[in-house]
Image (spheres, rainbow, N blue to C red):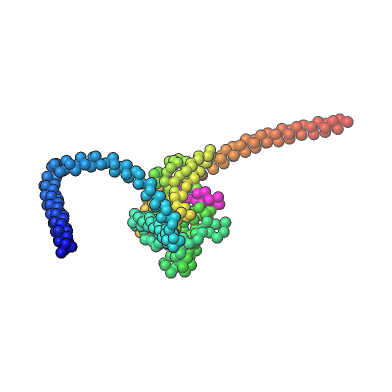
Amino acid sequence: MPLGSNRAPSSGLGNNNQGTGGRELVVCLIISIVLFTVGVRTGDSGPLGAVRGAFQTITTPVRLVGSAISLPFQGLGNIFSNLTADQATLSELEAENDQLRSRNAELEEAEQTATRLQGLLDLQNTYDLQSTAAHIISGSSDSWSSTVTIDKGTTSGLSVGMAVTSSSGVIGQIVECGATSSTVLLVTDESSSISAMVQSSRAQGMLNGSAAGEVRLDMIRTDQTVEVGDIVVTSGLGGVFPKGLPLGKVTSVEKNPGSMYYTIVVEPYAHTENAEEVLVITSLTDSQVATSEDVAAADAQETSSSTTSISDTSSADSSSTSNSDSSGSGSSSSKTTSGTSSTSTSTTSSTATTGN
């Protein structure tokens, strides 16, 4: 019995403690709900917002100090994690890095290709070109000529004589054409010659290459206007190149004494080392061929040059004839004097002999 009487009070005390803990939990929940409701309704302007702001202000220095103290330990933890990473993880990261680098290179190449193709498309639309796109697959195989090979030929409708241009400017003209490839003679080759004109003054001439790779604009008279920086374009004469395609920019203009023509050096716009895709112009429209006015202007320019040349030649011949006549008169006088002296001497000698 004494043992039983001792257990009963102990059990009752435990029940009282459990009841008290439950009441405290309920009271805390009620207070939390009330505070939450009041905080939502009053917002930051209410008393709870003021208390919360004051608490954040007080604890901010402590939180900053804690972050500053924990930051080095976080860095050390990352370093330790990297050092303790297994070889499989490192190999996986290296492989992923290689894939990303390769993908980045592919995207950059695709972007550059898209830019070049867009340039060709813009050129085609601007000049309304009837053309076929091709790729440059190789350069000249010898040092005696300046050519490139493209990956289109007769099966694609190409033929010898067709003009070839890049998005920057004219490259050259097809000189050999196979079934699946063609050879293009560049404007820098010494055998290349293209009808051209100065865009600003419309002075017409011939754009010729040279063995040294220098490109010159010939047959421009010194009475026409040409300046450094002028743009040179195709004139459309001959019906090979469309009128107005860019060829290059004038970099040097020299006027030699006594010469009827300028010495003009042109820097081509197109450089094959920077070109991969080109347009082959397969046919010309009526608007792309030189007009009758252009042909008449070119003929007038040639006629003027011929007249000037004939005039200079006639002046030179007249001067030569005058000098020859003057020289001939002097020679006749000399001969007459010489003949008179000879006759006088002969007469004197005869008289002397007779006297003897």
Residue sitting nearer the eye, 310 or 91:
91
User: Residue 241 at what x, y percent from top left?
Assistant: 42, 56
User: Residue 286 at what x, y percent from top left?
Assistant: 35, 58
> Extreme right residue here?
356
Residue in view at x 40 percent, y 62 percent: 133
Residue in view at x 30 percent, y 42 percent: 64
In the displayed structure, 141 sits above or below 234; it is below
Residue sitting nearer the eye, 117 or 327:
117
Residue sitting nearer the eye, 10 or 85:
10
Residue in view at x 35 percent, y 55 percent: 122
> Extreme front residue here?
2
Magenta span includes 133: no
Q: Quadrant of residue 12?
A: bottom left
User: Residue 337 at what x, y percent from top left?
Assistant: 71, 32
User: Residue 192 at what x, y percent from top left?
Assistant: 50, 55
> In the drawing, does residue 52 fall left or right of residue 295?
left
In the displayed structure, 309 sits above or below 100; it is above
Observer able to see residue 344 = yes
Magenta region: which residues? 203-215
> Could you tell me which quadrant the C terminus lies in?
top right
In the displayed structure, 343 sits above or below 114; it is above
Residue in view at x 50 percent, y 63 percent: 176
Q: Quadrant of residue 100?
A: bottom left
Magenta span includes 205: yes
> Could you tell me which quadrant the N terminus lies in?
bottom left
